[in-house]
Each structure stands twice: as C-alpha cells, then as structure tokens.
Amino acid sequence: AVPVALVAGLSRAAHFGVLIKGAKPLEMMARIRTLVLDKTGTLTDGRPEIIEIDSRNGMPEDDVLRLAAALDQASKHPVAQAIVSAAKQRGITLPVPLEVAEIPGEGVIGTVDGQMVIVGGEDFVARRTGRKAGSNQALAAGSVLVALAVDGRLAGYLIMADPLREGAEAVLTKLRQEGIERILLATGDRMEVAERVTKGLRLDGLCTELTPDQKVLTVLTERKNGPVMMVGDGVNDAPALAAADVGVAMGARGAAASAEAADVVLLVDRIDQLGVGIEIARRSRRIAL
Ligand code: ADP
Ligand code: MG
C-alpha cells in the first residue's frame, strides 16, 4: 500500500495545481539531483513578440510575415502561434498552406500561393536551402530568430523577444536549496540565444541545437549521475520527458503530447510551481520514511 503521507502529498500538490501521476513520481521527485530545462515556453514565457522583420532579397516586410504566418498556421509551436497572431493583428489575410510537413522543434515546410515556403529556425532553413547559417545582427535585440525561405531563397527573418518567465531566477535558487545539484538547459535553439536568455541564472550547462532525440540523449547521459527531472512544454520535449526519472510538463499552454508523456503536469502556468512540487515531494518523503 502507498504510505498515507504520500497520498496526502499527492492531494496537497493537486490542490496547488501540480498534478503528480502517482506515488512513484512523487517519491522520485524528492530524490532529483539534476534538472534539465527546455527553453521556449518552459524557462521563457513562450509568447514571443515580433520586434523586427528583417526582409531579404527584396521581399516586402508584410509578405515575410504573411508567408511565415500562413505556413505556421499548421503548427502548435508557441513561436508559430505568436507569428500567426501577429499577422492577424495586423489585419493580414492568411492563405491556406498545402502539402504541409512539420518537423517538431525545427519548423514547417509547405506550399503557399504556389510557392515552396520554409519557416523555422535559422539552421533548419539554412540546411533545407543549402546555405550556411550566419549570425543575425538584429538578433542582439531579441531572443528568438525565425528564418523564412521562398522557392529556395532566403526571404527574411523575424526577430522576436521571448522574456524569461516571472520568478524563473527565484525558483532555480529555491530548487538548489532543496538539493538539486545540477541545472541544465536543453534547447532546439542556438547557443547565442541560449546564452543571452539564461544570462545571470548561473546554469551548469547549455545544450543547444538539439533535436527531440538529442534531448533524450542529454537526459540519459545525465541519469548516470543520479535521478533527472526534465521540464518541457513542446511536442519535441515529449520523448525526453518520458526518458527522465521525472518528466514535468508545462500543462496550461503546453502540447498535449508533453502532458501525456509526463509524470507531473503543472496545471497553473507558472514556473514557480516546480518549487511547490519539489517542496511537497521532499516533505512527504520525510514523513513517509
Ligand atoms: P525549445 O527547445 O527551447 O523549446 P524549440 O526547439 O521548440 O525550442 O524551438 C527552437 C527554435 O526553432 C525557435 O526559437 C524557432 O526559431 C524555431 N522553430 C521551431 N518550430 C518552429 C515553427 N513551427 N515556426 C517557426 N519557428 C520554429
Ligand atoms: Mg519548448
């Protein structure tokens, strides 16, 4: 039978909007040594705003936004949703994309207005168009860089700002006090972005440009040093959440796939819920032992 202290812990956590799927993950949560955090939508707010459109090869700025948004209608990625709502806010009518394929965490390819369009991370778009990814000067002002290519040619960049979630720094300090020794970032995004976003957080490592499979590898490698908790929000995080000792999904706005793969779902859309969960887990374990 499950000790009554653990049952009480589960119910207490649920009361605070931290859904823990059983006594096992609750107990495991109390023993976590390493925390692996996704960036977009987990450590950051995940509702980026466009601060600049850097058009290339003579394409008007509104067309850069229109084509990117048209294709991103097919994606649930937080960056994609931000691009679609920005276009709608500007009153741009979006054509329906055809033959759409999404590569989770990387971008989308499809046909818009009879043209072959690619939208996504700089490296993804560069790879698909046979160019070399360069750094973008304008990115210094933001933290998310989305590239657009039309018929194999670079058409522009959307530079977006995606600030850290409120309380991110405080919760990491609290988690260290609760005994977590190592905190790492695992992101599909680039190093220059990861460095800028996490400046001041004193993380123990930044793992960047990761595919979903490489996020899994990061988790498995860290598990050699003790129990690992992985926190993520996206479809691309789901395999890594399943591979961790405790997978935590940002449930309020995150992808359904990540909530399903996770052992813990944060139903309140705040990063400090992590601290609440860990604290309850540690306390319940002390009482149960
Ligand atoms: P993280 O792993 O930090 O959550 P992702 O790997 O999900 O970040 O995304 C990294 C980057 O990939 C984004 O900042 C964006 O540049 C790009 N990206 C991924 N999917 C899309 C999409 N559907 N539309 C536009 N850009 C995308
Ligand atoms: Mg994410």
Image (cartoon, helix red, strand yellow):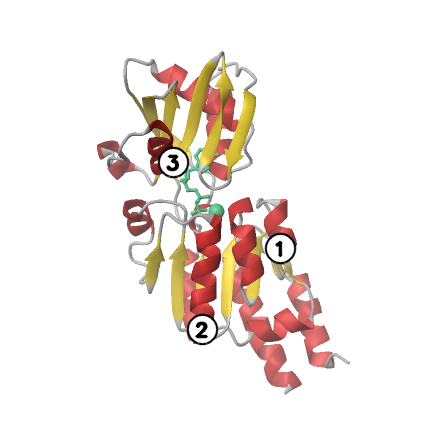
Q: Which residue does the image show at 49% across and 68% down from the upper left?
A: 228
**Ligand 2 lies under 8 Å from the Cβ of mark 1:** no
**In the picture provided, is 206 more to the left or to the right than 17?**
left
Q: Amino acid at mark 3?
A: Phe
Marks 3 and 1, how far apart at CA: 26 Å
Whichever of callouts 1 and 2 sits on the residue coming sooner in the sequence is 2
- Place residue 12 in its image quadrant: bottom right
Q: Which residue does the image show at 57% across and 17% down from the upper left?
A: 96
Q: Looking at this view, is 66 or 57 the one in front? A: 57
| Quarter of the rendering occupied by the N terminus | bottom right
Residue occupying the far right of the picture = 1
Question: Residue 30 got which mark?
Answer: none
63 is higher (above) or lower (below) than 110: above
Q: Looking at this view, is 85 or 227 the one in front? A: 227
Question: Residue 261 got which mark?
Answer: 1
Marks 1 and 2, how far apart at CA: 21 Å
The residue that label 2 is drawn on is: 224
- List x then y, in percent, for residue 268: 59, 53
Q: Looking at this view, is 175 or 98 the one in front? A: 98
**In the picture provided, is 114 more to the left or to the right than 144?**
right
Residue 174 visible to an observer of this rendering = no
Marks 2 and 3, how far apart at CA: 31 Å
Say if mark 3 contacts mark 1, CB within 8 Å.
no
- List x then y, in percent, for residue 245: 55, 68
279 is higher (above) or lower (below) than 3: above
The residue that label 3 is drawn on is: 124
Whichever of callouts 3 and 1 sits on the residue coming sooner in the sequence is 3
Local SS, label 2: helix
Q: Amino acid at mark 1?
A: Ala
- List x then y, in percent, for residue 215: 45, 55
